[in-house]
Amino acid sequence: MAPGFIRKFVRTERELLDTLAAAPGCRIVESDWNGHLLILDGDQVVARIADDSDAASLLDRASSLDHAGDYAAWAACPLRYGPCCSQWVLPTHPDAPGAPAFYKGEGTPCGL
């Protein structure tokens, strides 16, 4: 999908969390083949996360904490990296990882 068709751009952490929380069991953040970070509700694009935004930084932090070795910091993060590579969800999402990759002995949530 061309960026011109996306009507909503998410820039702040609060916007990101609120957009996901609007449908916590369905919505997921996923990186497309062009590296765009999209919020999806099933196959429907809900929004795109603005590059170099606070929202994008939160995704980076969630990814880093998945491998950092600090379980308390991972648990305190409002997002989970997973259930698969290049995806992020709220901890309440039914497919949210129950433990970070380092804790499970995996290289990534996909086991790569």
Image: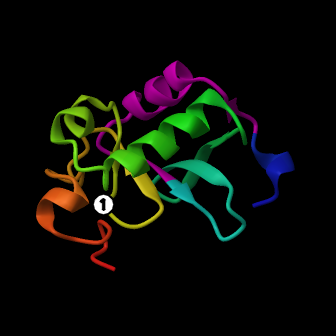
Density class for disc 1 (Cα within 10 Å; few <14, some 14-19, many ≥20) is some
Colour option used: rainbow
Q: Is residue 30 visible?
A: yes
Above or below: residue 110 compared with residue 30 = below
Q: Which residue is mark 1?
A: 83
- The question of residue 76 being in magenta is answered with no
- The question of residue 12 being in magenta is answered with yes
Q: Residue at x 75, y 36 (%)?
A: 7
Lateral position of residue 112 relative to residue 71, left or right: right
Most foreground residue, 89 or 25: 89
Q: Which residue lies most toward the right here?
A: 4
The residue type indicated by label 1 comes to: Pro
Lateral position of residue 68 relative to residue 60, left or right: left
Q: Which residues are magenta?
A: 7-29
Most foreground residue, 35 or 94: 35
Report the quarter where the C terminus lies.
Answer: bottom left
Please provide percent x and percent y for residue 102.
21, 60
The kind of secondary structure element at disc 1 is loop
